[in-house]
Image (cartoon, rainbow, N blue to C red):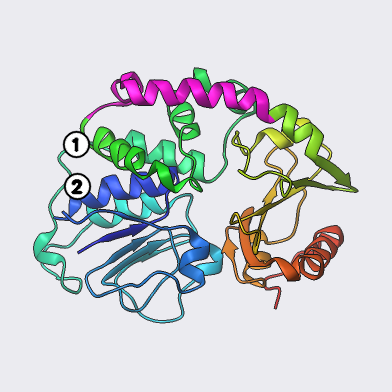
Amino acid sequence: MRIVVRPDFDGIVCTVLLKEALEVDAPVQWVEPNAMQSGQVKIRKGDIIANLAYRKQCTLWFDHHVSNRPNMPFEGAFELAPSAAGLIFNFFNNFDYAKNPGNVGDSVKKFQRDFTELVIATDKIDSASVTLDEVLHPEKYPYILLSTTIVSHRSTDEPYWDHLVDLLRKYDIQRVLDDPEVKKRSSEALEADKTYVSILKNHTVLNKHISITDFRSFGTMPVGNRFLVFTLFPEGIVNLKIRYHDEERETVIVSVSNNIFNRRCSVNTGLLCARFGGGGHFGAGSCSFDAGKTDEYLSEIIDILLKNEKHNSLN
């Protein structure tokens, strides 16, 4: 039995809850959404997928992305909810021990700690229900600060993600923040935000109501709070971020995020990105494609965002 999960704050809390509720000893498989969507991840019977697209080989699945809405029966939970962690929390808190969901029922155990506060914080962070002050001053908000230490595209951070899972299973948030490694990374994240502001100013342009951030000139993608762009370009109702996925520059990743402080974007971002092989939520999504298609696909994406029309689908 393995946990296959996305390496963001929601995914880390999903892993905390799954490890608490089930007997899972195998190393966590940290997977980026584009790897799952492109079929690069081999899923086998017994796997528990969380915060990623469904694969029929798995035993349990939990997700909340609009682009991943299932069209077949499965064991687990799907809902357009603030976080996947919240779905897992409710699933096991309300677990019917008289019934066996697939092959995992005999392994389920009750949570030994109260994770309510952690799940509420995850709902807030993953649904982008944060305030301007929380974006500008994360050091004042413990869970927000912790979330800024997680850089999901940096695979070398896997030991740190595992470390956070262990800490959050055992300790309250203040004890977690006092951990030497977490404290070091928190300080680094706050410093990185200062540099990130300058980088955003130099690499972002406005196209009417779209702010377009182009990081393709960087060998390594700059790190910083994903909401800072909305404080710098408040007139933009949606941000389009472009970067290369690999050193060979063969694959481009495009991220689309609605401005959480100027909520006038009508486009379902997750469905928009699904049209180009990706996915996400109503207000945030991403897709990856061959670099040779960049001009064509960016033109289509920008055209849809400029029209700013509400659609239930973008096929």
Do tag 1 and tag 2 residues touch (Cβ < 8 Å)? yes
Residue 106's image quarter? Answer: bottom left
Report the magenta residues as a range: 171-196
Residue 184 placement, left or right of 129: left
| Residue at x 14%, y 49% (from the top left corner) | 110
| Residue at x 64%, y 45% (from the top left corner) | 219
Q: Residue furthest front?
A: 248
Q: Amino acid at mark 2?
A: Glu
Of 157 and 66, which appears nearest the observer?
157
What residue is pinned by disc 2? 20
| Residue at x 43%, y 41% (from the top left corner) | 122
> Which is the main secondary structure of the residues drawn in magenta?
helix
Label whose residue precedes the other's in the sequence (1 or 2) = 2
Is 67 placed above or below 166 here?
Answer: below
Q: Position of residue 278 (x, y in %)?
A: 59, 66
What residue is pinned by disc 1? 113
